[in-house]
Amino acid sequence: MHRNASRRPPRVRRLSLWLGTAALLAAGTGAVAQTAAPAAPALGAKIKVGFMLPYTGTYAALGTAIENGFRMYVQQQGGKLGGRDVEYFKVDDESDPAKAPENATKLIKRDQVDVVVGTVHSGVQMGIVKVAKENNTLLIIPNAGADEATGPLCGPNIFRSSFSNWQPGYAMGHVVAERGMKKVVTLTWKYAAGEQSVKGFKEAFEAKGGKVVKELSVPFPNVEFQALITEVASLKPDAVFVFFAGGGAVKFVKDWQAAGLKDKIPLYGSGFLTDGTLEAQGAAAQGLETTLHYADGLTNPRDKAFRLDYAKQYKLQPDVYAVQGFDAAQLLAAGANAVKGDMTRKPEVIKAMEAAKVDSPRGAFTLSKAHNPVQDFYLRKVDGRENKVSTVAVKALADPARGCRL
Ligand code: PHB
């Protein structure tokens, strides 16, 4: 036990740590003796990281890749951040929004983590954001794009190392419009990630004269795509835009080919459709074009080293999820280093994270005012087992952060 005020309930203790730090900052040295600031954790205390990720279900591989990437960065720092050892706690969130508040509360109240790193699914993310805000716990989102987290629900303690759902959709809307396509049908899982990706797509596509003529969806995580694929074919669009990921993306891409549409209707998607899935998709994925903030064939040295290290350590090729996990750890390191590992100094941790320039395998990025990466979106094309970069579809794309007041 490294916290001194251990008899008080955790919520009160945390609040007093925040208030104590704020008072210290505001009051200057003269008032320090009066502010009853709690003592810092014992020297050598560990930084407690709580992974709330899917380890089962259609997104299981995504959760594992995020954890792998995160741990790899910490290992590269000798297992320490800000000079402190890192201790891990884990919860399988099962991509189930109904269980999110309870699972997040376990990490925050029971395990007393300094930071929650989670999650993949946008619906689960909403629950985590709520609990993290109530407890003033630092949160780093290593995937889920829920626009709200860096929009109306943004907060000083909420950070993202990944993307907003709006971003890759917007980039693809731009590409499809530039290609002169006019009439598009969209097809997604019916939850925030799909709906918000379509919104981003539509915003860029329709601003340039295109029209989304029908928005089709199937409940998450269903993979009975047949009826929808038949309906798409009957609508004869110029192109289709989809959001699917993980196990569901594998099934969709195979079903699309099996229905005989692969060479008939151009299929576009946000890059999750083909990231971490190509081995399982095989021939069905060849030639598919998607937009994402990561790609195969980038030439920066950071990516080269990252891929070599990851392949050596995990005997796997990294994907976008591994990159986002790696960068979540880099972001945390920026905060932890600024306070020499004393994570109770939250205003300073936050300030350092806000100012970080993350040397990511995707290319270096900074954070927007709402704490979302401002980053390039690549157009990629599947070639063998790779999402080969073709070009930058939109440079330094920032989420509009509608509704965020920070
Ligand atoms: C999401 O739910 O926000 C989500 C899930 C999987 C992805 C991307 C976004 O690959």
Image: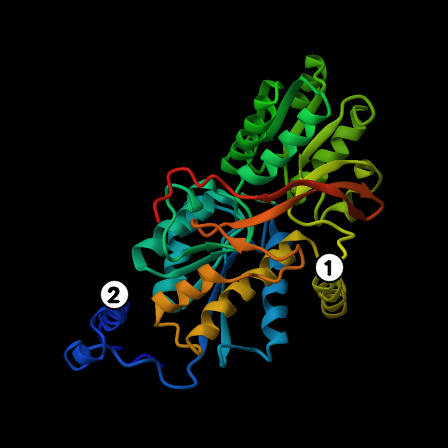
Q: Is mark 1 within 8 Å of ligand 1?
A: no
> Looking at the picture, how far across and down is residue 44, in whole percent?
43, 85
* Residue at horizontal 62 percent and vertical 57 percent from the top: 364
> Looking at the picture, how far across and down is residue 139, in whole percent?
43, 58
Farthest-out residue, left: 34
Residue 214, quarter of the rendered image? top right
Farthest-out residue, bottom: 43
* Callout 2: SS: helix
* Residue at horizontal 63 percent and vertical 64 percent from the top: 68
* Residue at horizontal 70 percent and vertical 64 percent from the top: 302
- How packed mark 1 is, by other alpha carbons closer than 10 Å (few <14, some 14-19, many 20 or more), is few
How is the rendered protein coloured? Answer: rainbow
The N terminus sits in image quarter: bottom left
Q: For residue 300, which numbered disc appears in the image?
A: 1
Residue 84 as seen in the image, left or right of residue 209: left
- How packed mark 2 is, by other alpha carbons closer than 10 Å (few <14, some 14-19, many 20 or more), is few
Name the residue beneath numbered marker 2: 15
Q: Is residue 382 visible?
A: yes
Type of amino acid at the residue the image marks with label 2: Leu
